[in-house]
Amino acid sequence: MRIRPAGEHALLLDCAGPDQVEAWRAELWRRRERGELTAVEIVPGAETVLLDGVPDPARTATLVARWTPHPASPAEPTAGAGGAGAGGVGEVRVPTEFDGPDLAAVAEHWGTDVPEVVRRLTDLRFRVAFCGFAPGFAYLTGLPEGWAVPRLSSPRTRVPAGSVALAGRYAGIYPTESPGGWRLVGRTSLPLFDVHADPPARLTPGTRVRLVPA
Amino acid sequence: MTGATGILPAGTVEVIRAGALTTVQDLGRPGWAHLGVPRSGALDPAALRLANRLVGNPETAAGLETTLAGCDLRLDRAGTVAVTGAEARVRVGDRPADVGRPIAVPAGTPVRIGPARRGVRSYVAVAGGVAVEPVLGSRATDLLSGLGPPPVRDGDRLPLGTPTGTPAGVDVTVGGPFPTELRLAVRLGPRDDWFTPEAVRLLLSTSYTVSPDSNRIGARLTGAALPRAVAGELPSEGLVLGAVQVPADGQPLIFLADHPTTGGYPVVGVVTDVTALAQARPGTTVRFHGPQR
């Protein structure tokens, strides 16, 4: 892990892959809960964790460099319980109707047929790596190397809310209707973002996710 | 518009003329970026805080942010209003009123905030604050995610809270002068090593121009393109306010309050204080300098 500067109030932890990101995210969240870290935001990315709203980044960098995160296992729930949006709590099963318009294209990329794509997607264990793009939009890791699928060359102007989709080595679910270039494989009626819920996002960083047939 | 927090609002403010883009803003909703929720909030928070202090509100109260064209309002009962930010003509009924001072407004009398003569955004605070329903702790309109109330439209009636403080007589007036050339302090990183040394030299030594495509999400600049040392896509990573992101065309973009929480283009540096950009019109010259100068 390498610490990079990000302005006068932030630090970017540059990690070695998604498991180290999750380990650091959970560690930093725990430390903040215990009052050992002051940061307004702890924002995981694909290979980084951003600490923003840090009063003294130089001092915090020294502190963070001394810490060792507990390793995150893809199969294990990670810590971070407590606090709004802490995430990492348990497993969310997403009831999915596998009828997406891009299923056949994904099958072709994977060199198989549609029933096998559905079987693979329901067998996989996903984990929320990070959120972005829209409130409650979770990037799910867990697709093996070699199963990456390219984005659409021309994004759709309207992707319905609840669309279950793939792009690169991520799966994701559109919480609200929006434009989008991911490959649509199915849809769910599970509400993913509700401003009145605590936390407002159903899929928070660290949460394990399984797609199950609806 | 819906969403009074109380049973009955302590009053309402009617929007007679919404202008080009008028939104409800407070100090935003920090703390939710890990769920993809942008910070949002006033682009010129110093001006909103001042307007709130002038009318006796807590600095965190919600007010209105106008864009270039001002707006016209009417209170359903007598109250105190303050206008800050851009240089603009303010009239209460037939009489002129000052920017940066509390204004006593009789019930039903139109308050007209004219177009910005210098700067871009006026802030209007009303005693009691705009009391639309908060979303994740904030009443701010977020134009990127759609959280918070939609931009106000002609005829909207917004609920007001109960005034809690006494209007201030005098306060430090912030805002202005509105320079035609901004000098912005920037700290390099986190991804300055994705750019050539020449790119960093260009960023710190040439001038850029604020593009008309700028909005609450970011100030787009045009000028010398910044050449990359590392090709390819950056894995998505968290973004901070003031991040100078460089998309594929090499033209820098400085992120403002409604910025996305993560992005896939490298950030060459971070601007220390973006407040001046809230009032920078398209065509304004921007020069960057390192924090040491």
Image (cartoon, rainbow, N blue to C red):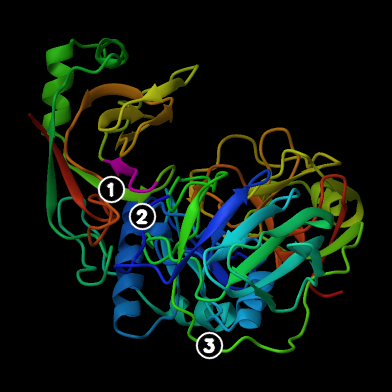
Report the mark closest to the observer, 1 or 3: 3
Residue B66 is at least partly visible in this image: no
Amino acid type at circle 1 is Phe
> Contact, CB < 8 Å: mark 2 with mark 1?
yes
Q: Is residue A110 left or right of residue B117?
A: left
Depth order, front residue of B191/A71? B191
Helix, strand or loop under label 1: loop
Label 1 marks which chain's residue?
A: A
Residue under pointer 3: B165
Depth order, front residue of B94/B258? B94
Between the C-alphas of marks 3 and 2, the distance is 35 Å
**Is residue A178 depicted above or below A74 in this figure?**
above
Does the magenta-highlighted stretch encompass residue A136? yes
Does the magenta-highlighted stretch encompass residue A83? no
Amino acid type at circle 3 is Gly
Q: Is residue A63 left or right of residue B256?
A: left
Amino acid type at circle 2 is Leu
Which residues are drawn in magenta? Answer: A135-141
Residue under pointer 2: B35
Identify the residue at image location x=15%, y=51%.
Answer: A75
Residue under pointer 1: A193
Depth order, front residue of B71/A18? B71
Residue A80 spot, x, y in % from top left: 24, 68
Helix, strand or loop under label 2: helix
Packing grade of label 1 (10 A; few <14, some 14-19, many >=20) is many
Residue A148 is at least partly visible in this image: yes
Packing grade of label 3 (10 A; few <14, some 14-19, many >=20) is some
Helix, strand or loop under label 3: loop
